[in-house]
Amino acid sequence: MGVLDKFKSKMDSLKNTYQKIDASVKITCKKCGYEAKAYDLIENFYICPECGNYYRMGARDRINLLTDKNSFKELYKGLTSKNFLEFPSYQDKLKKATSDTGEEDAVVCGTASIGENPCAIFVMDSKFMMASMGSVVGEKITRLFEYAIEYKLPVIGFTASGGARMQEGVISLMQMAKVSGAVKNHSNAGLLYITVLTDPTTGGVTASFAMQGDIILAEPKALVGFAGRRVVEQATKSQLPDNFQKAEFMLEHGFIDAIIPRPELSNVLSELLILHKRSV
Amino acid sequence: MNPYEKLKATRKSDRPTSNAYIQEIFDSPLELHGDRRFSDDLAIVAGVGFLGKYPVTFIATEKGKPDLQDRMARNFGCPKPDGYRKALRLMKQAEKFHRPVICFVDTQGAFAGADAEERGQGQAIAESIMEMMGLKTPVISIVIGEGGSGGALALASANKVFILENAVYSVISPEGCASILWKEASPENVAKAAECLHITAQDMKNLGVAEAVIQEDFENFSDMCEMLKNKLIEAVEELIDFSEEDLLEQRYRRFRKFGVFEEEKKGFFRKK
Ligand SMILES: [Zn+2]
């Protein structure tokens, strides 16, 4: 398949997921006010055709955009969060997030191929409670790494998160160590883990599996940091640079390997997967 | 004391900090400094010494003596990335020489400043946790005051975790939680958040996050430390005969079990 064909088939699969969308629906860019038709926006990888602003993408769109057509097989469906600490209004927030996104929780996991290279993949969905990490997110990603060890697969992880999910108290904190243990085992098995940091990757996810990739990529201008900007401002009492905690800032300070524009991601990941294939 | 009162008690400047425990518990402790990369972060105190007959490495967050100058020098116990890199350097050294690692946790959390972000606070913690999960030597952590979020977990991804009876451990500070969820960190809201987050030592025992709750007796601090020392020796003796493989497996299983959720397909509900 030529590059153009690949691109076309990708666009087709994207359109499939958006059949439900009315073609005339228009979305206004928050940055420049440009009104783009939903279809046009999808075709442009959710990047504003006028100003180049990146829109946040749902997990399914991301998977459709990235992986070979019909190659994605979802794993660990049916896991849902439980309000085991009886935290006020947690149940309502879960319900709303599920009805807003159609997802069961903030991460989608499975296997797929990218440029015909098999991999395990997880994609966090910032539209689900800001992709905060609770038991379900931790469990699904841990299982995915365990699966990848068993089947000797590389893992590609798209991170986005407001941090640990406080409604699950210290148990959400424990997910950081749980996933990190699985990442460590996967790494010890000599397998490749690539993270792609998307807007926004913060808090406990930054302080665990987002920063544990063998190769760490990021989307342009994605917010990447540990502490919240306002907290840092208060602690620092000085002017922060405009690009503070942006992907470009992280690149400059040596914490990510490369910034890859969204339309190029699929190709770059495919190349990296090929490069890491071990000769038999 | 209610959870909020316990939280406030952990922040009192006359509560014993890590250095006091280190002096009491270890014989001939020698502090070792620096991360060999950028600086020596005094919010982390680390070194080597004897726990009874066992050579060990100790690593601790240190809030500082009651006087303001010392507390400022130690950034009130909030480590920067350099502190976590010093900790990791000494953990790897302990692994090389097969020394158990004893960690003391007492921090509001990792420092949230521009310099910390610039030098990769998230990366430093992520690396610490990941490397601890693979460290081929026993690790025992004790939360002696405040166990604040990822900055605490970076020293607590251990084979065993103890917690003092009035210490707290939380995913986010109750102040932070209150201001995010209820807009204002008023005392009432913070107290409510402290309650909802389940931060007490007793909660940790119930949730399986801590293996043991250690009685406090600051009036008789030496006696209390003697008891804690015996508890640590006991734990070291239990873990020291593990093969490297078993040690890693035990640590992995310890954290693998955390998570409460519902699973539709198989129709069973997992509870820790
Ligand atoms: Zn625009």
Image: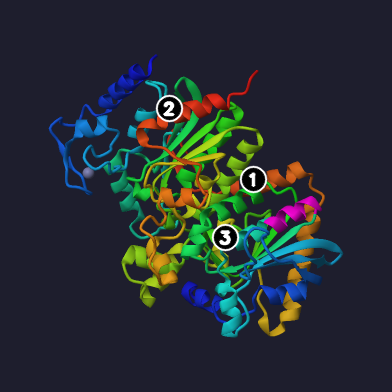
Q: In the figure, residue B63 lies in which quadrant?
A: bottom right
Figure quarter occupied by ligand 1: top left
Q: Quadrant of residue A38?
A: top left
Magenta residues (range): B89-98
- Residue B91 inside the magenta-drawn segment: yes
Per the model, the C-alpha gap separating discs 3 and 1 is 25 Å
Whether residues under marks 3 and 2 lie with C-beta atoms below 8 angstroms apart, the answer is: no
Residue labelled with disc 2: A267
Q: For the residues marked 3 and 2, what is the alpha-carbon distance in whole angstroms?
A: 34 Å
Prevalent SS, magenta region:
helix
- The reply to whether label 3 and label 1 mark residues of one chain is yes
Question: Badge 3 local density, few (<14 within 10 Å), some, or many (20+)?
Answer: many
Determine if marks 2 and 1 fall on one subunit.
no
**Could you tell me residue B80's position as x and y percent?**
56, 64
Amino acid found under the numbered disc labelled 3: Pro
Viewer-proximal residue among B133 and A223: A223
Question: Which chain does tag 2 point to?
Answer: A
Dot 3: chain letter: B
What residue is shown with label 1?
B252
Taking the magenta stretch, the answer to whether it contains residue A14 is no
Q: Nearer the viewer, residue B216 or B20?
A: B20
Label 3, secondary structure: give it. Answer: helix
Q: Which mark is residue A234?
A: none
